[in-house]
Amino acid sequence: MREVVVLGVGMHRFGKFPETSLRELAGEAGRGALRDAGVSPRDIQAAYFANALAGLLTGQESIRGQVALREVGVAGVPIVNVENACASGATAFHQAVLAVGSGSCDIALAVGAEKMFVGDTGRTIQALAASADVELTQDMGLQFTAIYAMRIQRRLKSGALTLRHLAAVTVKSHRHGRLNPYAQHQKEVTAEEVLASRPIAGPITLLMCSSISDGAAAAVVCSADVARRREAAAPPIRILASELRSGAFRSGAEEELSTAARTVRAAYEQAGVGPEDISLVECHDATAPGELLYYEDLGFCKPGEAGRLLDEGATAIGGRIPFNPSGGLTSRGHPVGATGLAQIAEAVWQLRGQAGPRQVTSARMALAQNSGGWLEGDSAVGAAHIFAV
Amino acid sequence: MREVVVLGVGMHRFGKFPETSLRELAGEAGRGALRDAGVSPRDIQAAYFANALAGLLTGQESIRGQVALREVGVAGVPIVNVENACASGATAFHQAVLAVGSGSCDIALAVGAEKMFVGDTGRTIQALAASADVELTQDMGLQFTAIYAMRIQRRLKSGALTLRHLAAVTVKSHRHGRLNPYAQHQKEVTAEEVLASRPIAGPITLLMCSSISDGAAAAVVCSADVARRREAAAPPIRILASELRSGAFRSGAEEELSTAARTVRAAYEQAGVGPEDISLVECHDATAPGELLYYEDLGFCKPGEAGRLLDEGATAIGGRIPFNPSGGLTSRGHPVGATGLAQIAEAVWQLRGQAGPRQVTSARMALAQNSGGWLEGDSAVGAAHIFAV
């Protein structure tokens, strides 16, 4: 496959925007990515549109991208609607990379957008449940926060983590989010506030959870050859790895890896790097304590040492390996189909040195890890991308 | 892009199967394609799953493919859910071709499945309307049959077509469908029956319409290099062109081409062939009279001459350029997400000489043309594939 680079990224702020439609959210992010890349709508030769819930929440199914991307001025070219639950955004990006990598086109656009505020939170939560195997889960009343809670409880029982850690990682998330103008929550919280906030699924409290959110993010990718021939304001960002995996997989090995771990290991292998080479991580903390599990799963510390890594300050901005300088899903917000592309936008801004007050110093290589859905006890989808300047 | 071939295809018969779930439909088609290709589930390195309506009709959104493909034994590898209205099936196939073509994998699976009988026809028709721009159409009461009817009426008024032609192309469709064991309708009809059947949207009658249908179809593609190293029961089928386009495009030229015409012209160009090289066509006759429009749009006769081409018998099995030997959407049935892959399965069977009583003699090259959705007066999606032995 030929080399593919990121030419530009764009975002619509995540948050509650009752007056803004899905296509307007997508339009702002898409136009931003084109402007950042220095390309016109006519330059885009293929587009991938990620959205998970519009069919159930707005009734717009099937041709969501063809409808929304008119706001960006993209029409006529191949447009493919992709859906992989909370990993839809990274999936769309992965497909854009394959399209350019195959040589079928030179410049492609990936846009992820989600409109979750539809005036009825119950309906939004019901739609989110469609990211699991509904035939199995619909009668169990099981939803995502409960699944996360069970995984965290196991660590609390074993003594590997304490409630103090759950609060501290949430405080860190909000401290980072306060520095991000695209974040839904831009306000610091204290450990006491975190623990005292409304219980959602013990031990997880409201402030530990990513919020229902509207938003969009986008990226323009192109072949390295074409990028070299262009005059760009910012240097193109190299894509060292673009990996996608699915769950419900049994390797037969004694120690089964999680979907996220398998995906990120494949990405390290594709890039020829290891966790020690990474400058920053955007990980899929649908609840803030979930980030602690990823420290271990993604290879940044040994099993059982996540609490210590956090306590040392290693994963805060200014630390050895900052996690979620953007605020992550917990503070930036989690408009399902947009999240994967927002992680990628953050990686690009960090590697270019454009992240303002949340800039990670000397950022040379970034990992973006996106998860989606639920299948047989693990994520149904894993996506991992490694970027470098 | 490196060369990609079709190694195997499979189908679940189209029709009304109230006892069969989406995953069971997909499972039978997927397993059939693997068996036909002579590969095991473990050989599949990436999968694309096409479905348009399950979110709205069954509540299973987001991870439809990850859920359904467990029936085929495919897990762990990249699985991407794609959605492009009635062109979802050909879109999934196109993505599988890009994945193999890019070199990111050697063998990929595309499955299209749809479950439209959910015990409430009104709900199915409502879900189908989500394939248009719902913000624009929901208050107009406009649906697909009405759109087709308006296009046909224009031809009737100009004298280019007569009611006799509309009946005759429907009779031909059902005559072909009777020979196809995978078709929903396997019964011949007379011109009198067609014209006397219930009016749907004048001049279109019930027997002219594709039916609500359950069904699935699948294909295994692989790199030509890998295919050469395999012992296969049937020879691999070459993919000369794989093109996808979107509507809402204005070229600025005086004579605007339809989405279908633009897509098929691009496919001819990619393959380096013209209509005169094609042995048979599977076209998107969501209503039987629509096939007459494609004779002209796809370059098989001059504008205004579709009626004559039909009258000559050129487009029937045994004629110069058979259209829809499978029975097409009208007689085979139209389970939305499965249709594009069913067209491709038919093309493969025909080119291998495995089409039984509906075999087109000396079939050397086949065109499969799939359309989807509705946007600003034309199809929102066009897909075209050209295959050769």
Image (spheres, coloured by chain):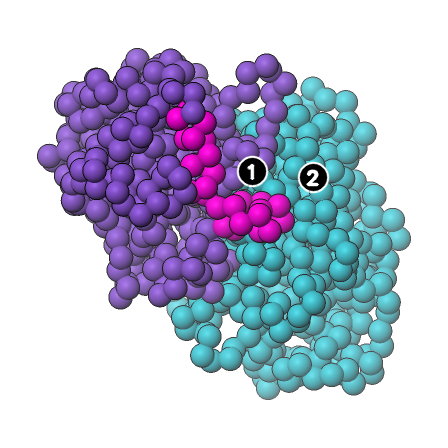
Chain colours: A purple, B cyan
Q: Mark 2 lies on which chain?
A: B
Is residue A105 covered in magenta?
no
In three-dimensional space, the C-alpha distance between marks 2 and 1, rounded to whole angstroms, equals 14 Å
Q: Judge from the rendering whether residue B153 lies leftward or rightward of residue B288; answer left or right.
A: left
Quadrant in which the C terminus of chain B appears: top right
Q: Residue B133, position in %: x, y?
A: 44, 67
The residue pinned by badge 1 equals A375
* Res A328 visible: yes
Q: Where is residue B165 in the image (x, y as percent from the top left)?
A: 73, 77
How many numbered markers are drawn? 2
Query: Range of the magenta residues?
Result: A129-156
Asked if A96 appears above or below A369 in the picture, the reply is below
Residue type highlighted by circle 1: Leu
In the picture, measured across the screen, residue B9 lies left or right of residue A91, that is right
| Secondary structure found at label 2 | helix
Furthest residue in direction right, as rendered:
B357
B150 or B168: nearer the eye?
B150
Query: Mark on residue B71?
Result: 2
Frontmost of labels 2 and 1 is 1
Q: Residue at x 57, y 66 (%)?
A: B128
Q: Position of B132 compared to A156: left or right?
A: right
Q: Nearer the viewer, residue A175 or B294?
A: A175
Q: How crowded is mark 2: few (under 14 residues within 10 Å), some or many (20 or more)?
A: some
Instruction: Name the residue located 38 percent from the left edge and 20 percent from the top edge.
Output: A159
Q: Which amino acid does label 2 sit on?
A: Glu
Measuring 16% from the left and 40% from the top, which residue is drawn there? Answer: A188
Image location (x, y in percent) of residue B42: 66, 25
